[in-house]
Amino acid sequence: MPKETVRSRLLRAAEELTHVNGAGNMSLDAVAARAGVSKGGLLYHFPTKAKLLEALVERFIEQFEAELAARIGTGSSQSGNVGAAVVEMFVQERSFGRPPPSGLLAALAENPEFIEPIRKQHTALLERIQSSARDRTDATIAYLALQGIRSNALFDFQHLPETIFDDVVARLRQMVRD
């Protein structure tokens, strides 16, 4: 396994800090310290907090797209059952206890324009889900349900009991199957 780059360590540290301390409480000093890098080293890669947050948004999108492509198995997220892959990604994310992407909130708090690449990615994702689906309406409902559950987790609104979550996932799987 290749050694993690300084840039990657900084981004991981920023993600961890936003999850632990909240979206608005991330400082460059704290990111540098958590990554084990001097502040000068951080500034070399990210001259401003805005650049760091912009990179967090880009990283989130890149990681999502890479995982989706791997799940579909073709190396391209344009074919296969995209809706089924997204449901399974969500289930795995939850079963591994992955925290919600709070780094995105930090980025949006810093600069609301950072929503645009996320909006474009979600629009394209929904189009891919719909175009690969047997039933476009069911696929859209499944996508919206996943986004709602994910938003609830991100904002810590409510937690579904496992039995209800399992029932919801079973229904979502039915909705997006081939």
Image: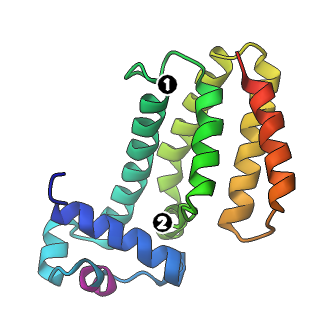
- Left or right: where does residue 135 sit relative to residue 99? right
Q: Is 59 drawn above or below residue 131 in the view shown?
A: below
Where does the magenta region start and end? 29-33
What crowding class fits label 1: few (fewer than 14 Cα within 10 Å), some (14-19), or many (20 or more)? some
Residue at left 76%, top 40%?
144
- Specify whether residue 31 is painted magenta: yes
Q: How is the image coloured?
A: rainbow
- Left or right: where does residue 108 sit relative to residue 47? right
What crowding class fits label 2: few (fewer than 14 Cα within 10 Å), some (14-19), or many (20 or more)? many
Q: Position of residue 30 (x, y in %)?
A: 33, 86
Q: Position of residue 24 (x, y in %)?
A: 51, 79
Give the main secondary structure, helix, strand or loop, of the magenta stretch.
helix
- Left or right: where does residue 58 sit relative to residue 164? left
- Identified by mark 2, the residue type is Gly
**Quadrant assignment, res 172:** top right
SS class, disc 2: helix
- Tell me the quadrant of the picture where the C terminus can be found: top right
Residue at left 70%, top 58%?
151
- Distance between mark 1 and mark 2 Cα atoms: 26 Å
Residue 72 marker: 1
- Specify whether residue 159 is painted magenta: no
Residue at left 80%, top 27%?
174
Residue 91 marker: none
* First-in-chain label (1 vs 2): 1
Q: Is 69 drawn above or below residue 147 in the view shown?
A: above
Q: Is 117 drawn above or below residue 35 in the view shown?
A: above
Identify the residue position indicated by label 2 in the image: 103
Residue at left 53%, top 37%?
120
- Identified by mark 1, the residue type is Ile
